[in-house]
């Protein structure tokens, strides 16, 4: 008997190859998107770890200067006292290769003897002919990265000029290094002996930092009592925050990938369900000749397994292809956001393929289970009747709508219970989508009912038939419509989220960037502030109205290493977008008490609010500051606090600044002022120069690049839904061939028939689109207020603009309409005899 | 001799293939990387002083540094006993290697031509464990160095310091590894012994291929040894130590594969040092030699023909899979000495940037027909 069942199924798909193709395509695409995202994520995660490893090496801790510089004597004292056993001194400085206009690189002064114990020479292993003896014993010798050697045709023995501190210094190449990270885009440093580095930067006597490998006891002891003017920072601390954020980013992507799989499930369901509907006569016959329910159930499920296996296999291959494209996007985004440069890919793990295959199979089985039950429950006679089916579908639509209520309650509780959990948030979001899907068939029926009078008046009988046709064929269109609605809601929701986010970022930039031109050090962390002479020189320029110096530094707090900005208000105020604390009062308080403002992400992550005190290490010992306000900050990199320069100079010794905001005098515009300032800065290396417009441009370019992958994924989910609706509409319309023939016989013209078919499918699209709008906006709300908040600690304003909403509706309509074209063409060509010959 | 010369030979990259195994590419051994990178030069030794003539050692000056020579070392080995006669062996060495004949001209305090390496190994016979650690650093910023007045040699927190007056040498030796620490007082019991031909110890037939070499063959040791975690209790110990001093610019001749070095302190008050320079064919070269120092300090030079050496047993390192001859018979027929040498524990392989076997040994045998005992150190290099 099972042979007979398999034969029946096989025959069915042989006669309906497009249905087979669509089912397989649904599974394949779902699996492909999921696996693609997973592969890209995994690869990105490993690349991220690798890059961190390259930068950090075995370093567990860093000894950093609190303000100015780190006396080199600390290094030998720590080692000679036995307080540390593994330590590497670092002197770091930005340089340009070839001349002032040349490419920018870091000159890394290391002790090669100590460095080897840390990170294979800062992530780069010496190539052939590397002469470390010469590096140590001959001043003015460097090792250059392979890529740079190639670019400048350098080899061992060549001389190259480097530009630093406003002068050109010739250095000799004594070896090349190949990059461990193996990425052409990363910018490996030039490595030199620490004595050469000190001599070149005229920084004799001091270090940028000391990298350490410490045992827990050593770390505790040194952390409690560091040499004066230094702090001990866990090397991991810095990247832990990064890890958290990149993980959130990847979770977001995985969720989108899963969504694609869920939409794929709808497609599988709709295909299976429809094939069951189509085979009801056969099933009726089978039941009549004695096939029992278990056998039927088993048969349909085996069918699903076969489809799932084929679909998943194809999905894995497609996923692999997709991943290649996605990996680049993910890496670029993570690089943009967190590294300031590109991160290179790593090989993915095989688990992902296994997971993808299992999910594909599992999803197919789950999706097929309902139709399988349907098939097995059918009584022999009912299976042969059609009307019974449509009636049951209608009541099922009502039932699903009722069921949506508890599902919504479940979603709300998930969202509320896990008040900070990202996974719970996604689970809640998933159930909201489920509820939306459940409501769609019911809403479709309501919509059709409501539009009946309009259709009758507008299109007469044909219009009415089209409208009623939609409702009447809900057994086959319900699920497809729901799938389309969910997919379109995703397109709308993600679109609205991105545009809301972008709007918020633009407004944040407008608030924050009050000056016209910004000067920053290439590497503020290297701790080489401007001299006050430069400030005076800048102020003296006629183009310059005023200058607002800022000092950026990092401190070790109970919450890890955080960035602090000390600044002065410009002519337009502090330039902060306050979200907690009254702006006037908060900034006024800054000037009288030891007040401080905290950024939103840090406030969220560590639960710091207005009125709370934070303790920061200062040069005058630990000091408590009171938080008077929380302000928006969409930048990444653990920027935490803002305080007045005056407060800064009270507690910290080093009064140099790391950035200057230049406000132009009235009557001058940025380009001409830029010329003058550029001339003033001509001989200073390591000063970065940007106009406000340029900063906005770069920020938004990075923003857009960040969301490109999100865009791609939502369109992939949309395409799967399109396939779903296509398969459903095709199936229905092709099955209606007989009905169409009768209508032809009744005197409908081919044109009228085509119009009717297209109207019907178009209406389906409208229904899906209408359902998708509220669902999409709800989704956007969740993404903006819950997911982004929990992922990154950012809030933003939900801005529902018409463009993404209209786009979604147009997509739904277009999907349904295009799906109707082929049946319409075919229906209009139907001869009078062919389809009715059976009658 | 010794022998320690080829240990540092790879540092200075003189053709000594096979003396010491090339450090592997294993990134887990960063020190090995450092050593390998530093050894990647070619240098014929010009610009440095050479050991050409015998010399009269001047103390305390010669206990200090000789930077005009390329390499130099201070080598301490000893056997001590703690509570319940618990035995420990220790080795502390300080190597100085010049990377260039002269120091670079620079305003930076980091600029130097001196590279320092120190090894510390502790043999804990009762637990059967062997601890070894090393320090690598540059001779700048006070990180490492040597001086004779006051006498002081140090590499970071490992150091030997004290009085180096001739005949009254009194040192304090301190070193600490992850699970072992020593703090020992060393008092010289015998005057310094000039090795080789009045201190000039030939390493090959070529002139200048030699080192200046002297030893303090017997130092009384007292102090403390700690094994285990930082808070483990220290064991009060007493025993005997040996100090070797050598400086040179040259290295081993071609065709020399390594050496086997013995420094033995006998229960009758005599001290014996002998090294066998081993050719590629496994045979002793004519430059092999040593000294036998009487209880009263009289020195008798030993040449190859004075000594009978026989391997009694081997031990294969599970780590490096190298087979070392760790049990020996050493006889000096004309002194009526016939000694059996057995390591306290077999695994005393030092596997740091340079790999060799250096371990505490127990001596038993006969002297003029009378039973005799003792302890000492055996060094096996080039295997």
Image (spheres, helix red, strand yellow):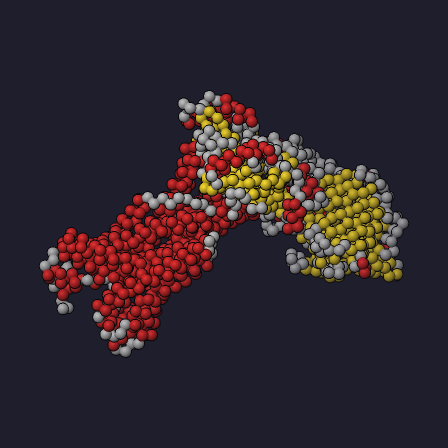
Query: In the rendered image, which quarter is residue A517 located in?
Result: top left
- Point out the residue furthest to the left here: A747
Q: Judge whether residue A64 can be spotted in this image.
A: no
Q: How many marks?
A: 0
Q: Residue at x 88, y 48 (%)?
A: B298
Nearer to me, B369 or A19? A19
Q: Is residue B175 visible?
A: yes
Q: Which x, y percent locates residue A72?
A: 65, 37
Q: Locate residue B7, reporting x and y percent.
A: 70, 47
Is A267 or A629 nearer to us in this picture?
A629
For residue A524, what is the image quadrant? Answer: top right
Q: Is residue B79 left or right of residue A328?
A: right
Which of the image's four quarters has the N terminus of chain A?
A: bottom left
Which residue appears farthest toward the right when viewing the image?
B296
Of residue A650 and residue A67, the one placed in the foreground of this image is A650
- Residue under the point 22% across and 57% down: A449
**B331 sits to left or right of A231:** right
The percent coordinates of residue A763 (x first, y second) are: 23, 54
Q: Is A609 on the left or on the right of B183, as rendered?
A: left
Q: Quadrant of the C terminus of chain A?
A: bottom left
Residue for point 56% across, 46% down: A559
Which one is nearer the viewer's eye here, A32 or A375? A375
Residue A39's place in the image compared with A190, above or below, is below
Question: Residue at coordinates 34% horizontally, 67% vertically from top-left?
Answer: A369
**In this view, which residue lies farthest toward the bottom?**
A290
Residue A633's x, y, as percent?
A: 46, 41
């Amino acid at each position: 008997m099972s042979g007979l069942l398999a034969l029946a199924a096989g025959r069915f798909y042989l006669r309906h190859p497009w249905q087979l193709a669509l089912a397989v395509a649904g599974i394949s695409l779902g699996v492909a998107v999921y696996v693609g995202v997973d592969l890209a994520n995994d690869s990105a995660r490993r690349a991220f770890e690798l890059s961190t490893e390259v930068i950090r090496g075995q370093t567990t801790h860093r000894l950093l200067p609190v303000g100015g510089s780190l006396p080199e004597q600390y290094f030998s004292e720590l080692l000679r006292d036995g307080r540390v056993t593994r330590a590497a001194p670092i002197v770091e400085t930005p340089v340009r290769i070839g001349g002032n206009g040349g490419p920018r690189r870091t000159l890394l002064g290391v002790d090669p003897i100590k460095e080897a114990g840390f990170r294979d020479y800062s992530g780069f292993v010496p190539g052939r002919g590397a002469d470390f003896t010469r590096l140590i014993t001959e001043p003015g010798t460097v090792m250059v990265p392979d890529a740079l050697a190639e670019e400048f045709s350098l080899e061992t023995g060549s001389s190259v000029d480097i530009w630093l501190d406003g002068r050109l210094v010739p250095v000799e190449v004594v070896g090349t290094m190949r990059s461990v990270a193996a990425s052409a885009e990363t910018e490996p440093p030039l490595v030199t002996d620490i004595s050469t580095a000190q001599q070149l930067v005229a920084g004799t006597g001091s270090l940028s930092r000391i990298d350490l490998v410490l045992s827990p006891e050593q770390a505790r002891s040194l952390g409690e009592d560091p040499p004066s003017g230094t702090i001990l920072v866990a090397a991991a601390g810095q990247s832990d925050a990064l890890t958290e954020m990149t993980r959130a980013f990847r979770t977001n992507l995985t969720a989108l990938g899963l969504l694609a799989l869920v939409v794929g499930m709808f497609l599988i369901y709709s295909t299976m369900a429809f094939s069951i509907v189509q085979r009801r006569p056969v099933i009726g016959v089978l039941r009549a000749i004695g096939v029992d329910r278990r056998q039927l159930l088993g048969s349909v499920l085996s069918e699903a397994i076969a489809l799932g296996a084929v679909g998943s296999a194809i999905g894995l291959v497609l996923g692999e292809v997709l991943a290649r494209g996605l990996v680049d996007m993910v890496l670029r985004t993570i690089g943009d956001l967190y590294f300031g440069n590109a991160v290179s890919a790593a090989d993915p793990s095989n688990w992902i393929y296994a997971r993808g295959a299992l999910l594909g199979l599992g999803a197919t089985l789950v999706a097929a289970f309902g139709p399988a039950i349907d098939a097995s429950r059918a009584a022999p006679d009912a299976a042969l009747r059609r009307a019974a089916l449509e009636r049951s579908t209608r009541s099922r639509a009502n039932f699903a709508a009722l069921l949506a209520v508890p599902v919504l309650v479940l979603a709300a509780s998930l969202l509320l219970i896990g008040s900070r959990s990202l996974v719970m948030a996604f689970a809640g979001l998933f159930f909201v989508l489920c509820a939306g899907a459940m409501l769609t068939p019911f809403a479709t029926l309501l919509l059709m009912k409501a539009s009946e009078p309009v259709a009758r008046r507008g299109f007469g009988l044909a219009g009415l038939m089209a409208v009623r046709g939609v409702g009447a064929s809900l057994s086959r269109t319900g699920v497809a419509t729901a799938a389309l609605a969910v997919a379109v809601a995703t397109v709308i929701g993600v679109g609205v989220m991105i545009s809301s986010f972008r709007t918020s970022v633009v407004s944040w930039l407008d608030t924050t960037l009050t000056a016209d031109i910004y000067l920053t050090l290439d590497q503020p962390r290297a701790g080489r502030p401007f001299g006050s002479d430069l400030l005076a020189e800048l102020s003296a320029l006629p183009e310059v109205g005023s200058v607002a110096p800022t000092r950026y530094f990092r401190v070790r707090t109970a919450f890890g290493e955080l960035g602090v900005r000390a600044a002065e208000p410009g002519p337009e105020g502090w330039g902060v977008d306050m979200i907690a604390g009254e702006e006037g009062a908060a900034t006024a308080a800054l000037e009288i008490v030891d007040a401080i403002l905290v950024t939103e992400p840090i406030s969220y992550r560590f639960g710091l609010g207005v009125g709370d005190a934070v303790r920061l290490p200062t040069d005058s010992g630990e000091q408590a500051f009171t938080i008077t306000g929380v302000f928006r900050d969409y930048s990444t990199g653990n920027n935490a606090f803002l305080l007045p320069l005056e407060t800064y100079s009270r507690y910290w010794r080093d009064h140099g600044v790391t950035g200057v905001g230049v406000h132009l005098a009235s009557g001058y515009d940025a380009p001409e002022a830029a010329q003058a300032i550029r001339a003033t800065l001509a001989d200073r290396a390591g000063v970065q120069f940007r106009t406000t417009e340029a900063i906005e441009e770069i920020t938004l370019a990075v923003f857009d690049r960040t969301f490109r992958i999100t865009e791609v994924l939502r369109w992939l989910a949309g395409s799967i839904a399109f396939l779903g609706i296509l398969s459903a509409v095709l199936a229905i319309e092709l099955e209606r061939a007989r009905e169409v023939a009768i209508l032809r016989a009744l005197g409908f013209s081919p044109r009228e028939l085509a119009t009717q078919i297209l109207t019907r499918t178009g209406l389906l699209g409208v229904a899906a689109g209408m359902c998708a709008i509220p669902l999409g906006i709800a989704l956007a709300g969740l993404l903006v207020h819950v997911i982004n908040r929990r992922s990154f600690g950012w809030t933003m304003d939900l801005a529902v603009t018409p463009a993404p909403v209209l786009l979604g509706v147009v997509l739904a309509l277009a999907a349904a309409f295009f799906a109707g074209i082929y049946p319409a063409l075919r229906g209009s060509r139907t001869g009078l005899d062919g389809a009715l010959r059976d009658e | 001799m010794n022998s320690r010369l080829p240990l540092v030979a790879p540092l200075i990259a003189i053709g000594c293939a096979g003396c010491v195994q090339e450090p592997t590419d294993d990134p887990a051994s960063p020190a090995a990387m450092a050593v390998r990178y530093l050894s990647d030069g070619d240098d014929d030794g010009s610009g440095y002083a050479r050991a050409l003539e015998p010399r009269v050692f001047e103390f305390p000056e010669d206990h200090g540094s000789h930077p005009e020579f390329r390499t130099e070392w201070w080598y301490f080995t000893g056997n001590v006993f703690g509570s319940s006669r618990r035995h420990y062996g220790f080795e502390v060495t300080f190597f100085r290697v010049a990377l260039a004949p002269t120091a670079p001209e620079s305003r930076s305090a980091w600029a130097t031509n001196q590279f320092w390496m120190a090894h510390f190994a502790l043999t804990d016979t009762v637990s059967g464990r062997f601890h070894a650690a090393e320090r690598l650093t540059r001779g700048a910023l006070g990180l490492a160095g040597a001086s004779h007045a006051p006498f002081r040699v140090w590499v970071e927190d490992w150091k030997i310091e004290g009085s180096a007056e001739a005949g009254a040498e009194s040192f304090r030796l301190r070193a600490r590894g992850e699970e072992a620490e020593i703090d020992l007082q060393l008092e010289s019991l015998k005057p310094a012994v000039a090795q080789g031909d009045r201190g000039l110890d030939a390493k090959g037939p070529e002139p200048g291929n030699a080192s200046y070499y002297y030893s303090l063959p017997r130092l009384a040791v007292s102090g403390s040894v700690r094994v285990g975690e930082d808070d483990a209790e220290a064991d009060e110990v007493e025993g005997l130590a040996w100090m070797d001093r050598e400086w040179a610019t040259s290295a081993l001749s071609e065709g020399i594969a390594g050496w086997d070095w013995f420094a033995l302190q006998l229960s009758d008050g005599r001290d014996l040092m002998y090294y066998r320079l081993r050719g590629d064919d496994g045979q002793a070269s004519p430059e092999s030699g040593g000294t036998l120092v009487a209880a009263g300090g009289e020195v008798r030079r030993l040449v190859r023909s004075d000594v009978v050496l026989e391997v009694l047993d081997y031990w294969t390192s599970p780590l490096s899979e190298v087979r070392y001859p760790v049990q020996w018979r050493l006889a000096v027929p004309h002194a009526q000495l016939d000694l059996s040498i057995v390591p306290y524990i077999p695994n005393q392989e030092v596997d740091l940037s340079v790999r060799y076997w250096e371990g505490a040994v127990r001596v038993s045998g006969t002297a003029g027909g009378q039973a005799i005992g003792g302890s000492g150190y055996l060094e096996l290099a080039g295997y």
